[in-house]
Amino acid sequence: MKIFSKVFNKTRYLFIFIAVVLLSHAPVRAQEQPLTPRQILDKVDDLFRSKSSQALATMTVTTAHWKRSLSLEMWSKGKEKSLFRILAPKKEKGTATLRSDNDIWNYLPKVKRVIKLPSSMMAASWMGSHFTNDDLVKESRMADDYTFEITFSGEMQGQEIVEVTCYPKPDAAVVWGKVLVRALRKEYLPLSIKYYDEELLLARTMTFSQVSQLGGRLLPAMVAMVPEDKPDESTVIHYKKIDFDIDLKDDFFSLRTLQK
Amino acid sequence: MNSLQYGWRNLWRNTRRTCITLAAVCLSTAILMASYGLMDGLMQHAVSNATNLVVGEVQVHAQGYRADHSIYKALNEPDLILRAAKQKNVAAAPRRYGYGLVAVGTKSAGARFWGVEPASERTTFDLAQHLQEGRFLSETTQRGVVLGQKLARSLQAQIGYEIVVVVQAADGSLGNDLYTVTGILKAVGDSIDRNAALIHAADFVELFVSGERIHEVALNSRGMVSTEGLTALLSIAAPEEEIKSWRQLMPEVSDMVNLFDAFIWIFGLIFLLAAGMGVMNTMLMATYERIREFGILKALGATPWGIIRDVAAEALVLAALGTVLGTILGLAGSYYLQEVGLDLSIFAGTYSVGGVAFDPIWRATISPKMVFIPVVLMLIIALVASLYPAALAARLDPVKAIHRP
């Protein structure tokens, strides 16, 4: 669907945005031994993952025609279940998205209806942002779908960084032709992930900044996504608060909770 | 006695042969006329179906709109376009477009929303009558939606059903509302069948927060003004916008029309040749029989030109008589084909070629052209066919001709 911006067709990638609400925990700490590329990728994937989590964030979307900020509350459990609810602005307040396994439902408080997202809309943008619905449901790990190697290690712009270049495995269900991950070499915190299309042209760039203590971890609090063909546009997620490993029951992720 | 009278009398010296040739000319003309009528009917059916239903003869969009259908690429001054159309008495319909999601129960699908002004659509196009079920939008409709056939089917929506619509509004917000299905369209063309959701312009503006934006003005004069005339009119009213004729908007229909045209000419040529051979044969035989006569005429001082004129006149009289009878027969047949038509429903129901839906009843159209073209061509062919026998007769040596047994 064009409406929800067709910038990111068929992204099948795991975003930190979702990662917030996904999977197991891995302490982030400076390592003595340099990590293998696989460990680096896993670290990036696991950055925001946990058994369960609850987070508050703002999402600021800037396009050529408008700029708006949404305030969001999110919950997750395991890597299959997540729930997002818009707290502000008023027009969208209460609008919620439930993701359970590969299905996505949206609740629209204005009309008091739940609608299930058709599979044809998976490539469409989520809530007008530069993330797609597909980004929400992707759950596999980079290290499983790609072959990778360290292509740079050393100082860049005054920081010690390591760069891992990933190419998709022939049978992997991914749309990218290449993914380039840059992380700080010391803490292995990600700095940027660049996504290239099948012709190896840069399609979009995700950058991480404002490293701070969130939920007992050292995490980048700001995640920005910029599409390459519209460099003036962006979606920036700013995490205000994250709690990891909280007590959430499976039935929390139900259509009933969605409609609250 | 002039050549025509002379020819007329000569024709009836061999009644049987003349009648057979007459029948050939008459039938050829009639078949030519009827098939021209049928082809023309099909062509006009295709064009008018394609243009009168929803596309119109000419459409205006903002530059670049047709490439990405962005809601932000609206016409600069749609009022000027509408005013220019009104001055020329050409009906025009302004439309707003946006994309979104429609859902009924657990079924959902993507849709292209059309913000239409029901009154303009009604006066400009036939779409308002092209409904399978229910009613078209009215001026007072609120939160009513008319769905494309396949969209309604995939949502399993019926008249009176409530559907949820969710769209990305022009200000970035999430527009959503409940609409009631008031009508379901008949088959129009694949993309409309699959994703069209027609709503009132006022509802569209509210849902999409789209303000004054109008994305398309479709003009339809129903043949009163030529496509070129409309294009010229618009290029004055809206020089900076993109103006496209139906031939450019629907190249597949345009190709089909050109193809039909070629068919008509090929058909016509075959029939004309057959009829022409008949005329030539008759005239050859008639000349051959009257070699002695021509010899005497020449001996009495007839010029070769006079003889050519006489033979050609005879052929012309024959052809004229044949075409008159053929026209009567052809018009009668075409009238039948126009009023009753050929029922193809035993072969197929409503069928669609190149995105244009056709009625299973194939009807002819009667036009002055369909009489004029076959008749004139038939007369020319008869005249040309008579020239060979005429030249033979004109070149006869009178002495040899008279002494021929």
Image (cartoon, coloured by chain):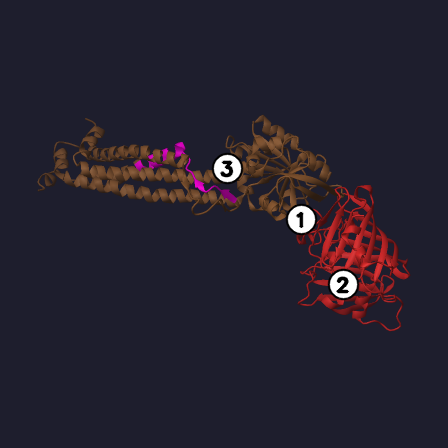
Chain colours: A red, B brown
Amino acid carrying label 3: it is: Ser
- State whether residue A13 appears in this view: yes
Mark 2 and mark 1: span between their CA atoms?
36 Å
Q: Which residues are magenta?
A: B356-378
- Return the residue nearer the eye: B363 or A247: A247
Magenta stretch contains residue B371: yes
| Residue under pointer 1 | B108
**Magenta segment: does it hold B299?**
no
In this picture, residue B46 sits left or right of residue A230: left
In front of the other: label 3 or label 2? Answer: 3
Residue under the point 74% across and 58% down: A137
Report helix, strand or loop for mark 1: strand
- Between marks 3 and 1 in the image, the one whose residue lies nearer the viewer: 1
Q: Which residue is mark 3?
A: B48
Residue B312: x %, y % from top left: 24, 35
Q: Please give the residue where the numbered disc 2 appears in the rendered image.
A: A180
Q: Is residue B279 left or right of residue A187?
A: left
Where does the image place residue B289, in percent across and percent down from the top left? 15, 40
Question: Do tag 3 and tag 1 residues touch (Cβ < 8 Å)?
Answer: no
Q: What's the chain of the residue with tag 3?
A: B
**Percent coordinates x, y for residue B283 in the rendering:** 21, 39
